[in-house]
Amino acid sequence: MAMQFFDHNGRFSPYDHVVKIFLPIIPRKLKPNHLTLIRLIFTPILIVWLLTENYLAALILFIVLALTDLFDGSIARLRNEITEWGKLWDPIADKFLVGSVVFILLLQLNFSLALLVLGFEVAFIVAGSLKKILAKDKEVQANIWGKIKMNLQCFGGAFLILGFFIGSPILIILAQTLLYLALFFAALSFISNGI
C-alpha cells in the first residue's frame, strides 16, 4: 500500500509524494516562505528578460520559479511550516508569475484570452481576500481545480515562452489551448469554492 501524506488538517496533496522524495536533501533552513519570496523577487527579472526577448533565460527562470511553487506548499505541509504570511503571499506570487508571462507574451497574440486569464487572476485575488475576511477564523485554501488551473497555466506559460524562443506556432497554439483549459478549471474552482 502506498504511503499518503497529509497536512496538519488531514488534507492530502498529490505533490507531497514528489516532494517527499527530495525532502531529505532540502536543508531545514530553507523555509517554504523563502521559496515564495524567491518567486516574488525574481519575477521582475523574468519580466525584463521577456521584454528584452531573452527567451531562453526567461524560460529557464520561469521553470525554476514554477518549481518553487510546487515545493513551497508541500514543504510547508510535510514539515508543518504553514504560516499566515505564506497563505497570503504564495497565491499572490503565483499570480504575479503567471500574469507576467500572459501580459507580456499572450497579449501580443490573443488579446481576448490574455484579458480573460488576467481577469480571472485578479478575480481570484479579490474573491479569495473577501472570502478570507468573511470566513473569519475558517481556513480558506486552494482546491483541486485551482491546483489544476495553476499547473495548466505553468505549462502554458512555459510552452508560450518556448514557442516565442524557437518561433514555433504549434507550441504557441498548444500554450493557448492549455490556457483556455486553465480558464475552465478556474471557473470550476470559483464554483466549488462558492465564490
Image (tube, rainbow, N blue to C red):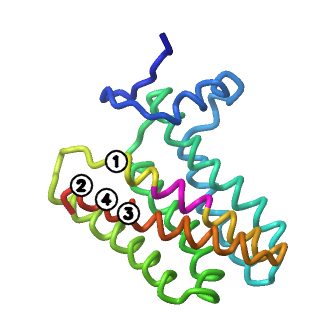
What label does residue 188 carry, if any? 4
- Residues tagged 1 and 2 counted as in contact (Cβ below 8 A): yes
Report how far apart the C-alphas of labels 1 and 4 lie in the structure: 10 Å
Residue name at image x 84 percent, y 67 percent: 56
- Work out how far the residue at label 3 is from the one at label 1, CA to CA, in angstroms: 10 Å
Amino acid at dot 3 = Ala
Q: Which residue corresponds to mark 3?
A: 186
First reached walking from the N terminus: tag 1 or tag 2? 1
Q: How much space separates mark 4 and mark 2, taking CA atoms? A: 8 Å
Q: Is residue 105 left or right of residue 12?
A: right
> For the residues marked 1 and 2, what is the alpha-carbon distance in whole angstroms?
8 Å
Q: Amino acid at mark 4?
A: Leu
Q: Secondary structure at mark 4?
A: helix
Front position in the image: 12 or 77: 12
The residue indicated by pointer 2 is: 193
Give the mark toward the camera: 1 or 4. Answer: 4
Q: Which residues are magenta?
A: 149-155
Give yes or no for contact between labels 4 and 3 (Cβ–Cβ under 8 Å): yes
Identify which amino acid the numbered label 1 is placed on. Answer: Asn
Evaluate if marks 1 and 4 touch, with contact meaning CB atoms under 8 Å apart.
no
Q: Residue furthest top?
A: 1
Position in image of residue 172 (x %, y %): 68, 74
CB within 8 Å, label 2 to label 3 = no
> Where is mark 1, residue-wise?
143
Type of amino acid at the residue the image marks with label 2: Asn
Q: Which mark is residue 166?
A: none
